[in-house]
Amino acid sequence: MGFIGSPRMNLLSAVSDGQSVSLGAVQFKPSLNAPPPAGPVTIGIRPEQFEAQHDGVVLKLTVEVVENLGASSIVHARLPDGQEVLVEQRGKSRARDGDVIEVRVERQEILLFGSDGTRLW
């Protein structure tokens, strides 16, 4: 499974119980037309979909590196389970290496893929 774009889409390993999806300690009901299949799934989140201010699924990340690019910044961080997450922020990021940050993404912005790589609707 691959996507064109920069920064690349976050593809995160998760597990579904047939109703909700668990990404480590974070559990949420995906915004789908039908329940997800039980078993391993992949979550797709574009780096620009993360926000700090709205409701949604909350992820706690440990910052490893911040790339300040002028109009935006790319924060390279990790989930507690070690999976890498890229977060795009407008302007210069205030995050520093080693900081623990919370980011939010609305459920409808989270893409879900089955174990065979097919997108689930």
Image (spheres, rainbow, N blue to C red):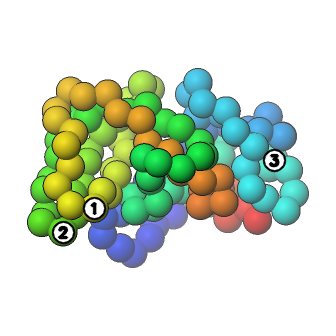
Q: Secondary structure at mark 2?
A: loop
Q: Secondary structure at mark 3?
A: loop
In the rendering, which numbered label is found on residue 37? 3
Q: CA distance from mark 2 to mark 1?
A: 6 Å
Please indicate whether residue 74 sits to the left or right of residue 55 in the image.
left
Residue 25 placement (x, y as % from top left): 58, 24
Please state which of residues 79 and 97 is positioned toward the viewer in this rendering.
97
Q: Which residue is mark 2?
A: 71
Which residue is outermost to the front? 53
Q: Residues within 10 Å of mark 1 (few under 14, many from 20)?
A: some
- The amino acid on which the numbered mark 3 sits, given as a three-letter code, is Pro
Q: Nearer the viewer, mark 3 or mark 1?
A: 1
Dots 2 and 1: beta carbons under 8 Å?
yes
Q: Residue at x 54, y 56 (%)?
A: 44
Q: CA distance from mark 3 to mark 1?
A: 36 Å
Residue 46 placement (x, y as % from top left): 45, 61
Q: CA distance from mark 2 to mark 3?
A: 40 Å
Q: Is residue 113 visible?
A: no
Please state which of residues 75 and 84 is positioned toward the viewer in this rendering.
75
Of callouts 3 and 1, the N-terminal one: 3
- The amino acid on which the numbered mark 1 sits, given as a three-letter code, is Arg
Q: Is residue 82 above or below residue 42?
A: above
- The amino acid on which the numbered mark 2 sits, given as a three-letter code, is Ala
In the rendering, which numbered label is found on residue 90? 1
